[in-house]
Amino acid sequence: MVVDVIIVGAGPAGSICARHLAQHGHSVALLDKAQFPRQKICGDCLTPRSWNLWQEEELLHGFEQLPHYVIQNFFLSSGTDSMLSVKLSSKNKGHRAVSRTDMDDWLLKEAAASGVHIRQGVRINEISGTHTVVTNEETFESRVLVGADGRNSTIARNLGLSPNKALCRRVAWQTRAPVATIAQGVHMKFFSQGYLGCVPLNEKEANVCVVINQPSSLTPQGVVARYLDIHSPLIWKSVSPLSRKPGKVAINQGLLIGDAARIIEPFTGEGTYMAMRSGQLAAQCISQALKNNTLNQLANNYTRAHHKLYQKMPFHNRLSRWLALNPKVAQFIVSFLKHNPSLLKKLVESNLY
């Protein structure tokens, strides 16, 4: 199949990118190794900043219809100490928890409805430069190749865009737990070797994520038993690397988006939003290059725009990442915030709007 753009990875970044391009008159093939709907390790939270993106992409109504949990409270704690709480404002559109299984499946269907050629459950056998992708089912030819295939991107490796593999001594774990055991809102808890975050998803279950610095004798099951009083065995999934230094995001007519391009610290709650923004940004750059016949400038234009996008991240996001990397310091700051609740509210809301 010959198309304008091949996108490998049908998560939110890939689907947003593919749909945007198709709606602007370009032919797109969107490939993924999984069959949707599929489970995905994620914090399942979207900040109010995402509402603008849904509106820009004419997806607002569909997003509002997805099963969700409206987040009205933010809880912060350290170890076994009592929780600090902040009532979140609901300026127009608020903070939501939405299952990635539901959201990703919906976005993929929206992409298909826009004319994107979807291929699920395919295995990539060969990649030749930025123009040819051979799968176990067929061969695709394109003018642009986009890697949206996550933090361990095959496309990045083949294009020579993989960043240096600095050792990441943290492992993230995720599970589902009975909602009755979880505070009714987003709860972030720091302990000496990491942190945990949890949020209800619906009336029955909640999402629980645990990050543990390595080496450690702690297990995610032991963490929830101690801090959430959950003792029944849970089914855990893990992901790594949890963080890395940003690398190159484009070369010639090959681009990276989402986690393939840059990983956002889970504690910030901005990972999915920033991934979708990068997908939208890549689509805009690609569309302009195709229409103006300036594909030779695509890599430089996208690299500059991508850098600018991440420079706009709120200060609180940077602070949050630093705290996540230094949980012992975070414990001290939580103690300080107990005596300054107004400061906590200001910090939280600076990340949401």
Image (spheres, rainbow, N blue to C red):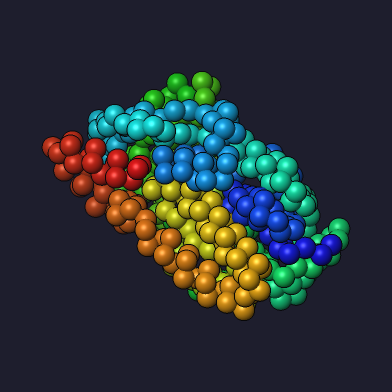
Q: Nearer the viewer, residue 176 or 50?
A: 50
Q: Position of residue 177 (x, y in %)?
A: 51, 29
Q: Residue at x 29, y 29 (%)?
A: 87
Splitting the image into 4 quarters, where does residue 283 fall? Answer: bottom right
**Side of 181 where 332 appears, left or right:** left
Residue 13 makes an appearance in the image: yes
Kindly tell me whether residue 10 is visible in this rendering: no
**Vertical placement of residue 223 versus 11, above or below:** above
Residue at x-position 53% and y-position 63%: 261
Q: Nearer the viewer, residue 196 or 90?
A: 90
Percent position (x, y) of residue 20? Answer: 63, 52
Which residue lies at the image location 63% right of the left edge and 71% below the top edge? 292
State the image coordinates of residue 52 (x, y, percent, origin top left): 46, 43
Q: Is residue 230 left or right of residue 28?
A: left
- Residue at 31%, 31% (x, y): give it: 89
Q: Name the outermost residue toward the right.
A: 137
Residue 306 position within the rendered picture, expressed as x and y whole percent measured from the top left: 48, 65
The quadrant of the picture occupied by the N terminus is bottom right
Up/down of 182 relative to 190, above or below: above
